[in-house]
Image: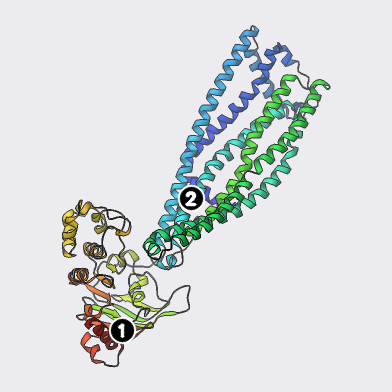
Amino acid sequence: MSTYLRILTYARKYKFALSLSVLFTIMYALLNGLSVYLSIPLLDTLFQQHSMDQAAKVTGSGDVSSILPQFIIDAKNYVVNEFNQYVFSGTTTDILFRICIIIFATFLFKNLFGYLQAFFLIFVEQGIIKDMRNEAYSHLNSLPMSYFKNERVGNLISRIISDVMVVQNSISATFLNAIREPLTIIVFVGIAVSISWKLTLVAFITLPFSAGIIAWIGLLLRKHATMIQEKIADLTSLIQETVSGVKIVKAFGMENFEFKKFQAENFKFFKLMLNITRLRNMSAPITEVLSVMVGVVIIYYGGYLVLEDNQLKASEFLGFLFSIFQLMTPIKELSSVNNRIQESSAAGDRIFEIIDTKPNIADAPDSVNLDEFRDKIEFRNVTFKYDDGDETILDNINLDVKKGEIVALVGPSGGGKSTLADLIPRFYDPVSGDILVDGVNLNKIKVADLRKLTGIVTQETILFNGTIESNIAYGLDNIPREKIIEAARVANAHNFISELPEGYNTNIGERGVKLSGGQRQRIAIARALLKDPSIMIFDEATSALDNESELLVQEALDRLMINRTVIVIAHRLSTIRNAHKIVVLERGKIVQAGTHDELVKQTEGLYKKLYDMQFRTNSH
């Protein structure tokens, strides 16, 4: 229940709409009760009983007047007398006409108030869902890279889309029913008690049995709801992975294998849905059967009071039956409210799991601004491990990168090159040691300022579904087209963009699938150029390109390096011969450092071996 109460706290900002909804709900419930209560004078009129008969009603042990305080009895009698004087005056036809007008007006306003209370509740419900989804998505973007390393993309998508939808469905039912139905029950119970408290007491014998059954079903539903949301996440992940890797699936002829894997997961989801539907539909019929069972007892006992004991008039007994059977619908709805609350709580737990995750990379309370990079980046005894592993990725790294230098990181795969570069924009924090920019520790610099000064071009180019123009100007507002074209020219991208049917307005598809690898890379370089960062990181930016594309991209990279501090992670050593410093990493340690000419002369060094290996390969 604590999870669901937390969901409801999002309604605070919509308290005005919620207050209006509650007001209209009260009016709806009162008029709903009145519409049933009017059946008594209608029946009396049809049975040719007069107002004097109303006043002559026998007050026996079953009348609520025998147990209520006197001031309530007086108020009730005053209202009844005023109503009788207005309705039961004139001819029988006049009385019937007045009653029909009152019944019509009652139903008219009841439905008007029902519409208004539903409208304002839907406004509140949709507002809550909007705010929850916004908060979850916003917080997701604030989480560090290490979080995404351990989470499946499909699972995160499922939480923000599917789980929030479950919460929406439950709020739609529970917010409406949890307010309207209890009020309706109170009104009809009040009517029933005012007619006969003995009959009312008999009617509610079923409640303890129903409540126990409903609570038991609700607990089972919460367990199954959690399992269903997890299974939806599995299905989403499976679809996402298959679609992303569709080329490999087809190349290896694994379509049938992937289908069978999906079919198995989908069948598990099918069985879970059958179970939860069975449980969800169980409480309402059980409650109804118990209610009808007691209803039969009420009919027998009430009939006895009318026929044998003369404690009730026939019209009042029928009014009582109308009231009791009007209670069945709200009680059935309330029985489903608990079930929906349990389902919503299970989905809410998964959403709040994202929201409650504390980012371990954030601005310190005493963090400072960094508007310009002036001197150098220093690594002092830096050691790094991933949160979920014992393997040391970087071991006691000491390195200086001066402003305006081109520093290349080389070495075998898995040596820690990319991780070292990722520490500069604080995608991760070292487990020990310090990284300083202009003498200030990275964890004392505002993260937004640090990343504003840093640009990254990676081997796997990340573009977004949109136009070429929006991708180049990513993260920047109100950039003139001229500046975008200028960045594209420097990146050797303007010519191929101009040849496209819609030029810079061409939609490049998800992840830029409509462009070649070299074209995507040049768009990424244009994006970095437009951002104009002081520190550039190139993570094997040309390793996956053909020779022609590599020449165009390398030329663009050379232009991008001018007057910037550059960290290059190089696969092809021929591209870094002019670097001011080459750092050789092996198994997380710096084993060599120097210029290309210096390192080549160290015949026993790793760099010389890597260079000779590539030279021999290229010469063949």
Question: Which badge, 2 or 1, comes first in the chain's sequence?
Answer: 2
Residue behind mark 2: 164
Residue beneath label 1, please?
584
Most foreground residue, 402 or 291: 291
The foreground one among 476 and 388 is 388
Label disc, if present, on residue 147 of the rendered structure: none
Name above or below for residue 101 compared with residue 363.
Answer: above
Q: Residue furthest top?
A: 91
Q: Is residue 468 left or right of 242 when viewed as pictured?
A: left
For numbered disc 2, what is the local secondary structure? helix
Residue 71 in view of the camera: no
Work out whether 190 lies above or below 531.
above
Residue 529's x, y, as percent? 21, 64
Q: Looking at the picture, which amino acid does disc 1 mark?
A: Val
**Type of amino acid at the residue the image marks with label 2:** Val
Give above or below for 162 relative to 578: above
Using a 10 Å C-alpha cutoff, classify the residue at mark 1 as few (fewer than 14 neighbours), some (14 to 19) or many (20 or more). Answer: many
Q: x and y percent of residue 606 in the render? A: 31, 88
Q: Residue at x 61, y 42 (%)?
A: 336
Q: Nearer the viewer, residue 331 or 569?
A: 569
* Residue furthest right as drawn: 308
User: Which quarter of the figure has residue 98?
Assistant: top right
Give the image location of residue 105, x and y in percent.
Answer: 55, 20
Looking at the rendered structure, the secondary structure element under dot 1 is: strand
What residue is drawn where x is 70% and y is 10%? Answer: 48
Percent x, y of residue 144 = 41, 66
Q: The C terminus appears in which quarter of the rendering?
A: bottom left
Measure the C-alpha gap from mark 2 to mark 1: 48 Å
Task: Answer left or right for 534 relative to 268.
Answer: left
Residue 551, located in which quarter of the rendered image? bottom left
Q: Is residue 197 left or right of residue 155?
A: right
